Image (spheres, helix red, strand yellow):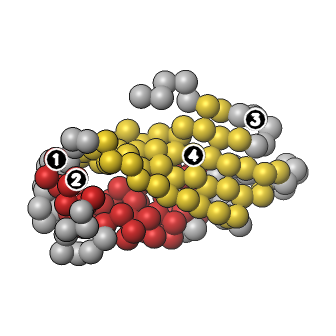
């Protein structure tokens, strides 16, 4: 594990995104809260937040961070895509990129789990860092916002 003890404590923020592509009927069921397992987006939001808080248990050599906040949001992109965005914030010696990426990943997996009974051809993909702020390297903002 990298020693970050000499680094200053600064305000950190990272935003990540990912997509779940599915049949249009499945996306509509999610929007209408029409699946037997319940409100897919609220369960996936909670799963993403919980996962971000446990990132150091999931990713070897990842520092344990005192998170100030984690936000997970969903945007339907009709006809067949659900966009997931997660933002993680901390005041720490190291960044929160992994926490944001883990939140997106586990949220996507939860969407898959809750809808697999009606759609087995879903694809989880394009999980990526969109933005980060704080620390020595400063600001990163993805230029291709596709």
Instruction: Give the label, 1 or 4, closer to the camera.
Output: 1
Q: Which mark is residue 138?
A: 3
Q: Quadrant of residue 89?
A: bottom right
Residue 96 x %, y %: 64, 52
In this rendering, the answer to whether 47 lies above or below 133 is: below
Residue 137 seen in this snapshot? yes
Q: Distance between the Cα atoms at labels 1 and 2?
A: 5 Å
The residue depicted at 58 percent of the width and 52 percent of the height is 87
Image quarter in which the N terminus is found: bottom right
Residue holding disc 2: 27
For label 4, the residue is 15
Q: Which residue is mark 1?
A: 24
Q: Residues within 10 Å of mark 3 (few under 14, many from 20)?
A: few
Q: Earlier in the sequence, mark 4 or mark 3?
A: 4
Of labels 3 and 2, the one closer to you: 2
C-alpha distance separating marks 3 and 1: 40 Å
Q: Residue at x 53, y 40 (%)?
A: 129
Residue in view at x 38 percent, y 39 percent: 126
| Mark sitting earlier along the chain (3/1) | 1
Q: Dividing the picture into quarters, in which one does residue 44 lie?
A: bottom left
Is disc 1 in contact with disc 2, using a CB cutoff of under 8 Å? Answer: yes
* Frontmost residue, 145 versus 33: 33
- Element at badge 2? helix
Q: Are marks 3 and 1 in contact (CB under 8 Å)?
A: no
Please, what secondary structure does the residue beneath circle 1 have? helix
| Residue farthest front in this picture | 32
């Amino acid at each position: 594990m990298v020693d970050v003890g000499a680094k200053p404590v600064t305000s950190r923020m990272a935003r990540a995104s990912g997509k779940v592509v599915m049949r249009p009927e499945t996306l509509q069921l999610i929007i209408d809260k029409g699946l037997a397992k319940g409100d897919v987006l609220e369960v996936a939001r909670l799963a993403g937040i919980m996962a971000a808080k446990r990132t150091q248990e999931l990713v070897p050599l990842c520092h344990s961070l005192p998170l100030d906040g984690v936000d997970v949001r969903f945007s339907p992109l009709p006809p067949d895509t659900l966009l997931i965005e997660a933002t993680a914030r901390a005041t720490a010696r190291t960044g929160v990129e992994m926490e944001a990426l883990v939140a997106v990943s586990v949220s996507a997996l939860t969407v898959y789990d809750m809808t697999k009974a009606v759609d087995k051809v879903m694809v989880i993909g394009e999980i990526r860092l969109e933005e980060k702020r704080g620390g020595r390297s400063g600001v990163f903002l993805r230029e291709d916002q596709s």
